[in-house]
Image (cartoon, helix red, strand yellow):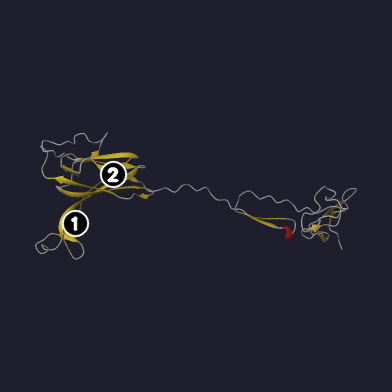
Amino acid sequence: MVPGFADPGAGPAGDFHLLASSPLLSLDPTPLGATPVGAAESASDLDGKARITGGGRDLGAYQHQPPAVTPAAASSSLVLSGEAPSEAILWLTLEMPDLAPMASAPDITGASESHSRWRAGNGLAGIAAGNGLAGIAGNEHGAPVGTTFSFNLNEPAAVRLAFTERVSGRRGSRRCAAETRRRGRRPRCAAGASTASMSFMGHAGVNRMAFQGRASPTQELRPGRYVLVITATSAAGQSAPRSLTFTILEGQPA
């Protein structure tokens, strides 16, 4: 039987450490719970290392010491460590890339209007400075001219204001239809007709839009009841819609 020494001919004294393939390894296994070494046998070998590091005592002056295994730095590779297949340890380490927080769609909060019932004016809609209420006042009849829409944005975004007129109609078979003599006895309902829209670049914080009924030189709201839907869009998506209702009264400002 070949003892499997590391290098018996090395130097003047030779190297009699046992290789991982030596048949002398654990030749005298110590059962679990039993005394690891005899009363007359040292608890360490000639190197001062513990006599039992694996399945049992090795024959010879040196107890075989399996190589220490240190986990490799984080990577996506597989590492096999050990001197023999029986001592091979498989290390699987994964390196996860840094993930940037996912962007979220804009958020609109605090949608409000300075007046919900007002008379139309001649001014075009525009970004309101300050509190946006300058020039919006009632006359002797008490009806103000125009209103100011306000809302908060959590980030800069493209804002769209869409106006839909609420008109009275009669209930049809599937939807609310325009009122006619033929439908005169059917239940009344309110239908929506898209009337005008306008867009602008909103900023983070409070945004105010002064509005007197004219979204553009060619888009003018007539007296009636309306629903305003406000949305904001960025590269991450579109916000949840916010709505306001208002009524434009009959009569022009003096």
> Badge 1: few (under 14), some or many (20 or more) residues near its Cα, within 10 Å?
some
Q: In which quarter of the image is the N terminus?
A: bottom right
Which one is in front, 146 or 98? 146
Residue holding disc 1: 191
118 sits to left or right of 233: left
Q: Position of residue 204 (x, y in %)?
A: 35, 40
Task: Report the residue that reaches farthest toward the left.
Answer: 181
Disc 2 versus disc 1: distance between alpha carbons? 23 Å
Marked residue nearer the N-terminal end (2 or 1): 2
Q: Which amino acid does label 1 sit on?
A: Ala
Picture residue at 73% right of the left edge, 60% below the top: 86
Q: Name the residue under label 2.
A: 111
Using the rendered view, name the quadrant where residue 81 is placed: bottom right
Residue at the far right in the pictured view: 12
Determine which of the numbered discs, if any, sits on residue 156 in the image: none
- Residue type, label 2: Ala
Residue 3 percent location from the top left of the image: 86, 59
Q: On the rendered image, what quadrant is the C terminus found in? A: top left
Q: What SS does tag 1 mark?
A: strand
